[in-house]
Image (cartoon, rainbow, N blue to C red):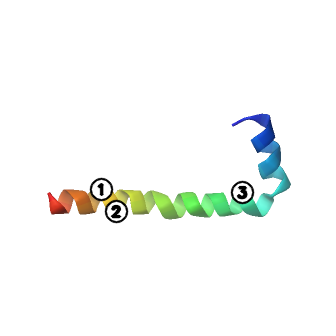
Amino acid sequence: MTADTYNFYNSYPELNGLQRYYKLLFNPFKLLKYWIILIII
């Protein structure tokens, strides 16, 4: 992460919070995709 993006995220704390929620949301979905692929195979 560059200093510019770091300052950007610091100036928008709600954006940073959203990013955390997205990480929590998308990580299980990625795992689900792998499980679905394994089940189909």
Left/right of residue 25 with respect to residue 13 in the rendered view: left
Circle 2 crowding by C-alpha within 10 Å: few under 14, some 14–19, many from 20: few
| Residue labelled with disc 2 | 32
Left or right side of 29 for 6: right
Q: Nearer the viewer, residue 2 or 17?
A: 2
Residue farthest toward the top in the current orientation of the protein: 2
* Mark 3 vs 1, N-terminal side: 3
What residue lies at 57% left-to-right and 62% top-to-bottom? 22
Residue under label 1: 34
Q: Residue at x 69, y 37 (%)?
A: 1
Q: In the figure, residue 31 lies in which quadrant?
A: bottom left
Please determine whether, in this image, residue 34 is positioned above or below residue 4: below
Q: In the rendered structure, which amino acid carries the disc numbered 1? A: Tyr
Assess disc 3: are there few (<14), some (14-19) or many (≥20) residues with their C-alpha within 10 Å of its C-alpha. some
**Label 2 with label 1: CB-CB less than 8 Å:** yes
Badge 3 element: helix
Q: What amino acid type should be assigned to the residue bearing mark 3?
A: Asn
Residue at the (17%, 62%) spot, across then down: 40
Q: Secondary structure at mark 2?
A: helix
The CA span between labels 2 and 1 is: 5 Å
Q: x, y (%) of residue 41?
A: 14, 57
Question: Left of 33 or right of it: where is 26?
Answer: right
Q: Is residue 14 above or below residue 10?
A: below
Marker disc for residue 16: 3
Q: Residue at x 83, y 44 (%)?
A: 7
Image spot of residue 28 (x, y percent): 42, 61
Q: Name which residue type carries label 2.
A: Leu
As helix, strand or loop, the secondary structure at mark 1 comes to helix
